[in-house]
Image (tube, coloured by chain):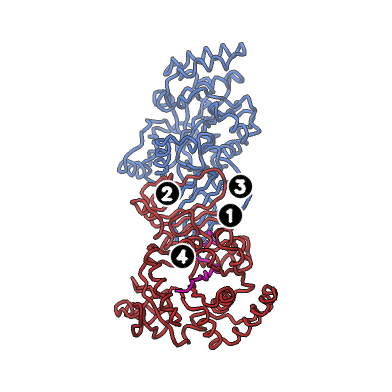
Chain colours: A blue, B red
């Protein structure tokens, strides 16, 4: 197998983990999946290591986050931290990062991975990635489809077609987030997998697919490549990139391309979509509480306490008569909510936005 | 009417307002009754002012609390802050403070008041106190009985006897905390009032009653008086006071004395017995939330947020999908509980004690 590279997508700035996640410290830079000392991004890089060493890891992020991002992955070379001058969804970003890798290694195999997911079984994950890369070597655009464990309506699905090599199958189509009835049918049928936003391809194959399906972006990237040859990539990027359309790799390339394959994945995947997921992934006592060790619990079950305050003085929490609560504290904000309302953190953020309270966003 | 003096009992160190109240900053030194800028003790002194100016107010507290106590009532002369060398319940404390007042004014009328209660209607309260003092001038030991508004099992009751002057009645007896059935009978019957721990008497009358019913204490106080005449009160106090028995004025004097009267009180009294009372007394929005002004509320009702953290940075709270919650924050502790569990704060304090975690007590 030729050398494998990775593009880790780390430009996100979600709102579902407020007040822990902020514009300046989004989810991927937080330790939200059990291990309080490892950010989701650092875990992503660490997990890949047996297949892709840090020198071959590229991280696509925003200008604003570049510094904080580099800090949590010190082994990734600074030149591999790609700074998008504007947020244009995944297609321009992946296409540009692929070009950057091709300049280094025209035969590169590339894995594109989100930076903010949790994977329980790293060896199983790596075996799946290896298989996806083998299929990608045969000029397929490959994705991993997570075997569903529930009738989830919050994800896109991949409809599985005919078998090809390495246990992979052709993708018959990508399906938008279904309603409950369809999600249940998908779960029963066994022919639909969750789209987890992971993609594998030969750099050249992707470059060609972008030329075909997003020719405007391809032309812009040609200009950036020429500038890079003269040591002028940043200037060209700043000029060209913001003019790209905002389009996802799914919609812009994967759904339109011909040779698209999927490899089934079963490795304890979790997209860490809300504080409820963070609670699920956290270490818990026998009462289901994920709280600091010295917390006083009086008839309290299923609670999550997440203390991000930075004062030196230790704080002790006491919970009395409370179940399934989420309490998150930072120096300037405190969130208390029923765990089942985890999605409504967005409403809090929307309210703060409408107040013009940028300090807290 | 001869000059009225007050003894305010401010030595308490309760645990029901943890983590706001601590050994070093107990309930009476907290602003727990609506006005966030006035401690309960300061409110007690302020409220009395039309009848008893600060120069005639004596505050009985512990050595450890004397400094913090003096700070919240700057108009009370420092010499009037009486420092008990040991906690011996109310009888020794009131008897000693009464002697201290008698040395200044042998004809003094004295009002004894708790420092940590809330009174909504100050003018009605003052009218009641005035009446109690008029009855006290006739050599009665007088108490105020609060007209019950519910079948409360947490208070002692006063059984009302024959009418005397000024709308007062003779006390037929003091009744311990009743069970629910008796409390309901008391409420229906109309002959029982709540004992709110307020007492009114001529100094001389109380001194004589102490001589009769607690002669050991009276002898000890004689020794202290003699030492005071030589400017040696502190030394005598330190020697004598700790040897006094721990006994309440109710049990040691009031229940045994002959001329005991009660005046009915109806002035919006609340003993601020728990965080649930603090919520009741606090200013609330139309959803029943007593929270900082900039709190973000998403379907949240009946909550109390009490922020005592001292960092300069402002903190914003967000509550999502929560009803009837109490959240109290200090620099080193955070309490979250269902309001209906307010009494169980004691369990938290007991747990901290059993851990030997004195820092938080």
Residue under numbered circle 3? A311
Residue topped by disc 1: B332
Q: Secondary structure at mark 4?
A: helix
Closer to the chain start, of discs 1 and 4, is 4
Residue B332 on the magenta span: no
Badges 3 and 4, same chain: no
The mark found on residue B115 in the picture is none
Image: magenta residue range: B1-21
**What x and y, as percent, mark residue A129?**
54, 35
Tell me the residue that label 4 is attached to. Answer: B48
Q: SS class of the residue under badge 2?
A: strand
Left-right relation of B125 to B42: left
Q: Are marks 1 and 4 in contact (CB under 8 Å)?
A: no
Across and down, in percent, residue B123 comes to: 38, 64
Of circles 1 and 2, the one toward us is 1
Q: Which residue corresponds to mark 2?
A: B319
The residue at 33%/38% (across/down) is A178
Give the percent coordinates (x, y) of residue A122.
56, 42
Tell me how far mark 1 sits from mark 4, CA to CA. 35 Å
Question: Looking at the image, which residue is at 51% across and 71% down?
Answer: B5
Q: Position of residue B258 (x, y in %)?
A: 45, 88
């Amino acid at each position: 197998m030729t050398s494998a590279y990775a593009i880790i997508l780390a430009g996100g700035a979600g709102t579902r983990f407020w007040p822990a996640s902020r514009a300046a410290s989004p989810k991927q830079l937080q330790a939200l999946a059990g291990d309080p000392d490892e950010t989701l991004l650092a875990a992503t890089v660490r997990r890949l290591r047996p297949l892709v060493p840090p020198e071959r890891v590229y991280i696509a992020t925003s200008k604003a986050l570049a510094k904080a991002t580099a800090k949590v992955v010190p082994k990734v070379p600074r030149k591999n931290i790609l700074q998008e001058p504007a947020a244009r969804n995944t297609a321009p970003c992946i296409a540009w990062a692929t070009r950057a890798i091709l300049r280094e290694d025209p035969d590169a195999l590339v894995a594109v991975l989100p930076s903010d997911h949790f994977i329980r079984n790293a060896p199983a994950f790596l075996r799946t990635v290896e298989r996806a890369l083998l299929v990608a070597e045969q000029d397929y655009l490959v994705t991993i489809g997570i075997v569903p464990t529930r009738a989830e309506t919050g994800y896109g699905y991949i409809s599985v077609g005919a078998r090809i090599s390495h246990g992979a199958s052709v993708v018959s189509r990508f399906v938008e987030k279904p309603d409950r009835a369809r999600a249940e049918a998908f779960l029963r049928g066994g022919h639909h997998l969750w789209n987890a936003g992971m993609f594998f391809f030969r750099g050249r194959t992707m470059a060609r697919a972008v030329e075909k399906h997003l020719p405007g972006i391809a032309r812009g990237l040609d200009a950036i490549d020429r500038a890079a040859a003269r040591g002028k990539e940043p200037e060209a990027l700043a000029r060209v990139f913001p003019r790209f359309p905002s389009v996802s790799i799914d919609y812009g390339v994967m759904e339109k391309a011909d040779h698209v394959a999927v490899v089934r994945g079963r490795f304890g995947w979790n997209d860490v979509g809300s504080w409820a997921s963070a609670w699920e992934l956290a270490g818990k006592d026998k009462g289901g509480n994920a709280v600091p060790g010295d917390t006083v619990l009086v008839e309290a079950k299923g609670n999550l306490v997440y203390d991000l305050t930075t004062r030196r003085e230790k704080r002790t929490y006491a919970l009395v008569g409370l179940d399934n609560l989420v309490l998150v504290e930072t120096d300037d904000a405190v969130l208390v909510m029923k765990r089942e309302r985890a999605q409504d953190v967005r409403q809090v953020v929307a309210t703060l936005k409408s107040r013009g309270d940028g300090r807290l966003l």
